[in-house]
Structure formats: C-alpha cells, structure tokens
Amino acid sequence: MFDYMDGAADDEVTLRRNSDAFQRLELVPRVLRNVEHVDLACTILGCAIRMPIVCAPAGASRLFHHQGEAAAARAA
C-alpha cells in the first residue's frame, strides 16, 4: 500500500504533469499584513462556502486507513 500511495502509476505522466505545474507556481509570502478581518468565503460549484475545506471522494479509503471513508467524513 505504501508503494501505491507514494509511487506513481504506469508511465508516471500524471506525476510529471503535477510536478511541472507545481514548478510553475510562485509562492509569495505576505508578511506584516493586517489580518484583523480575514474572509475565507468563496463559491464552489455555485454553493457559498464560509471556509473552503473540501474532501474529495477517493473511494477505497480503507486500503489506507482502517476506518476508511467514515474517518474522512468525521474529519470533514
């Protein structure tokens, strides 16, 4: 299971594309910013969400954790 989660499948095309996309990003730290009023609200698929934390359905989660999807649902 570790190799499945840690490794890349077949010809590793998705791994390379994800790595390339991440390399194109530039993270710019913003220090000394006023954070007195922070608003994390956004709209996802037409639904207003106050805090954008999303758990994507993965399926077969019990392969990686003994409680599987139930644990992910409780965490969400």
Image (tube, helix red, strand yellow):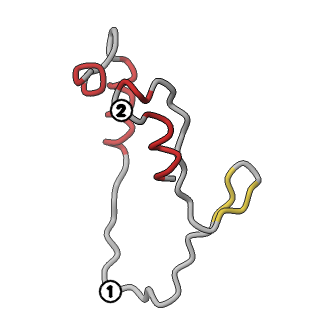
Q: Secondary structure at mark 1?
A: loop
Residue indicated by mark 1 = 32
Give the residue type that dot 1 points to. Answer: Leu
Q: Crowding near pointer 1: few (<14 within 10 Å), some, many (20+)?
A: few
Q: Position of residue 36 (x, y in %)?
A: 47, 90
Q: What crowding class fits label 2: few (fewer than 14 Cα within 10 Å), some (14-19), or many (20 or more)?
A: few
Q: Which residue is mark 2?
A: 66
Q: Which mark is residue 42?
A: none
Mark 1 or 2: the one toward you: 2
Inspect the image, locate mark 2, and give the three-letter code of the amino acid beneath it: His
Q: Do residues under tags 1 and 2 come within 8 Å of each other at their CB atoms?
A: no
| C-alpha separation, residue under disc 1 versus residue under disc 2 | 43 Å
How many numbered discs? Answer: 2
Q: Quadrant of residue 8?
A: top left
Residue 73: give x, y in percent of width and height.
Answer: 53, 46
Mark with earlier residue (1, 2) = 1
In the image, residue 10 sits, relative to residue 28, either above or below, namely above
- Residue at the image point whose x is 54% and y is 39% from the top: 56
